[in-house]
Image (tube, coloured by chain):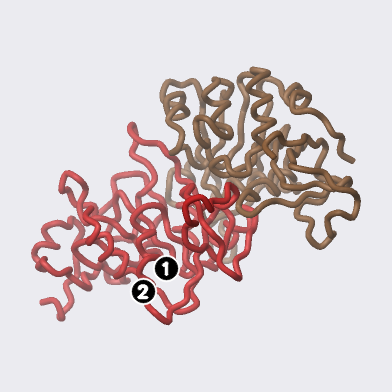
Chain colours: A brown, B red
Amino acid sequence: MYKLITAAEAAAMIKPRSRVCIGGFLAVGAPETVIDAIVAAGTRDLHIIVIASDWENRGVGKLVVNHQVGSAQVSHMGTNKEIQNQVNCGEIKVELVPQGTLMERVRAFGTGLGGVLTPTGLGTVVAEGKQVINVNGRDYILETAIESDFALIRAKKADQAGNLIYSKTARNSNPIMAMAGKVTIAEVDEIVELGGIDPEDVITPGIFVNYIVLSKEK
Amino acid sequence: MAMDKRAQIGARIAKELKDGDYVNLGIGLPTETANHIPPGIRVVFQSENGIMGVGPAPANGEEDQDMINAGGGFITALPGASYFDSATSFGIIRGGHIDVTVLGALQVDQEGNLANWMIPGKLIPGMGGAMDLVTGAKKVIVAMEHCDKQGNPKILRKCTLPLTAKGRVSLIVTDMAVLEMTPQGLVLQEVSEGYTVQDVVKATEADLIIPDHLK
């Protein structure tokens, strides 16, 4: 069962070199309250696993600007010049991962799989150094699971069992990352009583959620 | 590129869409396609951040912070729309459920290879969802200017930039021409008004098959 904590308590769990999945797509659906607390804590040398490096003043971009990121697995950095600067000068080591592959690698870790077989990236630099496996006459790249210590996610609503629902396109990577953290911390707008979310509507079952932080955004 | 050329490319690509198609448009020029859907044709637009049934941009002041497309622009949802997580979204894409994707290109070559995600030493934005889209969509249409800003051909014998995917392009629509990938090679299907076949051949490095109707 989840425990309700403050954003500062969430940030204090995260240590230098922690591997941290952070939800959101261009900062929509990003756990901004928890991110702000990590910025305030100043923890450095984080490894982040994110769809995109967001904007310099929103989402994980704030961690980049504050020089707290040591390495990243990310699919798109085009909206954040600062991460490109830090990559160019060697401050951040980046593995660029196709977005669909990134999601499957994160999902694999959360669901007990060693990896997945995907055609995405065949014949490109993404395939370099990786095993190609033929299944029923088709080639696939073996993409291994991405391990994470923490998943920091953003949902609209939780009930007292920790079940989560999301808001529109703010759902994006959050339900996948929710499954993948050894410790999952969900930032939510509100917590409703048991039965306040119809079991049919639950997107993330509460079993995946270890901690909840109330968002300052709403 | 001039607005009329963008519109011309968008209108030509829109003619490729069939009633009932599920379509994913890349950022920039490809989005022009949505402005030219022929009457009587209903297509459903996906945005890979997690929505099927993307509607038009909201009116000023009506923006919903939780409603964006993959380019970060505000959108609305049409009746019948659905939201889903990123793994489902890319399952849709990689699983071959998207009928058509339209993407921009830095280079494309006569073997159907596409390069559109990085320029080594210069630009490293990352591939985002492009590799999955080009690998998984049933039909990959490239929308681009025929030549780069310096006037160099972008349709090559062999791409020199890192590839997005190998052998997946089916159609190239530019301001000058429409070119189709076939098992025999790259066929020049149409030449835009104001250009000759020779103009297109000169602006193209790839070997082109010129069909009888253009000779």
How many numbered dots are placed on residues in this image? 2
Q: Which residue is mark 2?
A: B16
Q: Quadrant of residue B211?
A: bottom left
Mark sitting earlier along the chain (2/1): 2
Question: Picture coordinates of residue A106 (x, y %)?
Answer: 66, 44
Q: Is residue A10 visible?
A: yes
Question: Picture coordinates of residue B58 (x, y %)?
Answer: 49, 57
Q: In this image, B5 relative to B60: left or right?
A: left
Q: Quadrant of residue A59?
A: top right
Type of amino acid at the residue the image marks with label 2: Glu
Question: Picture coordinates of residue A176 (x, y %)?
Answer: 69, 48
Q: In this image, B110 relative to A92: left or right?
A: left
Check disc 1: other Cα within 10 Å, few if <14, some if 14-19, many if 20+. Answer: many
Q: Is residue A182 visible?
A: no
Q: Which residue is pictured at 45% across the width and 45% down the height? A: B127
Q: Which residue is mark 1?
A: B139
Q: Chain of mark 1?
A: B
Observer-nearest of A124 and B24: B24
Q: Quadrant of the N terminus of chain A?
A: top right
Q: Say if A156 sits above or below A32 in the image.
A: below
Question: Picture coordinates of residue B165 (x, y %)?
Answer: 41, 54
Label ID, residue B115: none
Q: Which residue is pictured at 63% across the width and 59% down the height? A: B83
Query: Is disc 2 in contact with disc 1, using a CB cutoff of under 8 Å?
Result: yes
For mark 1, give the secondary structure. strand
Give the spatial CA distance, label 2 vs label 1.
10 Å
